[in-house]
């Protein structure tokens, strides 16, 4: 009975790829928000940098929301970094104990 060889590092590489894709999506979302915020800032500067009553309240609320979201995203990135560290350690282990056949 012939057995096919399955590389032991493939699961770790697949996990790593999923984490990297997730991080790329989050970075793209951050970029979109940054571009939007920069456009809003330019618009405010064009009007003399003055924001009137109701707009000021909305702007302050938006800042609070963005800071909260930013904190949440930082926590997610820290968690992703930790997952990457674990996956890298697993991959290193597999490379060392798998005869160095990992790509």
Image (cartoon, rainbow, N blue to C red):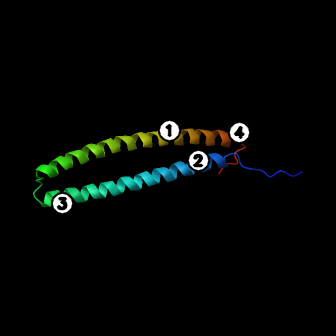
Task: Say which residue appears at 14% left-offset and 57% top-offset.
Answer: 45
Q: Is residue 18 above or below residue 93?
A: below
Q: Is residue 40 left or right of residue 52?
A: right
Depth check: give the residue in front, 1 or 9.
1
Residue occupied by mark 1:
82
Q: Of the two numbered discs 4 and 2 on the same chain, state the one appearing first in sequence.
A: 2
| Numbered circle sitting on residue 15 | 2
Residue 50 percent coordinates (x, y): 10, 53
Q: Nearer the viewer, mark 3 or mark 1?
A: 3
The furthest residue to the right: 1
Which type of secondary structure does the marked residue at label 4 adopt? Answer: helix
- Whether pointer 1 and pointer 2 mark residues with C-beta atoms closer than 8 Å, the reply is no
Residue depicted at 51% across the width and 51% down the height: 20
Asked if disc 1 and disc 4 are in contact, CB closer than 8 Å, the reply is no
Residue 100 at x, y = what percent?
Answer: 69, 45
Circles 3 and 4, Cβ within 8 Å, touching? The answer is: no
Identity of the residue furthest to the front in this view:
54
Q: Nearer the viewer, mark 4 or mark 2?
A: 2
- Assess disc 2: are there few (<14), some (14-19) or many (≥20) residues with their C-alpha within 10 Å of its C-alpha: some
- Report the Cα–Cα distance between label 1 and label 2: 13 Å
The image quarter containing residue 12 is: top right
Q: Earlier in the sequence, mark 2 or mark 3?
A: 2
Residue 9: percent from left, percent from top: 66, 46
Give the residue number, with chain letter if any, for mark 3. 43
Give the labeled residue for mark 4.
Answer: 97
Q: Nearer the viewer, mark 1 or mark 4?
A: 1
Among numbered discs 3 and 4, the one appearing first in the sequence: 3
How far apart in space, not on screen, are marks 3 and 1 (Cα)? 39 Å
Measured in 3D between alpha carbons, the distance from the residue under mark 4 to the one under mark 2, in whole angstroms, is: 19 Å
Q: Earlier in the sequence, mark 1 or mark 4?
A: 1
């Amino acid at each position: 009975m012939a057995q096919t060889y399955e590389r032991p590092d493939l699961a770790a590489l697949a996990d790593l790829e999923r984490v990297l894709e997730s991080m790329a999506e989050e970075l793209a979302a951050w970029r979109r928000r940054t571009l939007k915020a920069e456009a809003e800032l330019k618009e405010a500067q064009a009007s003399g940098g003055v924001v009137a009553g109701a707009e000021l309240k909305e702007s302050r609320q938006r800042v609070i929301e963005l800071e909260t979201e930013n904190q949440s995203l930082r926590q997610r990135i820290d968690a992703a970094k930790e997952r990457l560290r674990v996956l890298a350690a697993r991959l290193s282990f597999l490379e060392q104990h798998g005869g160095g056949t990992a790509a």
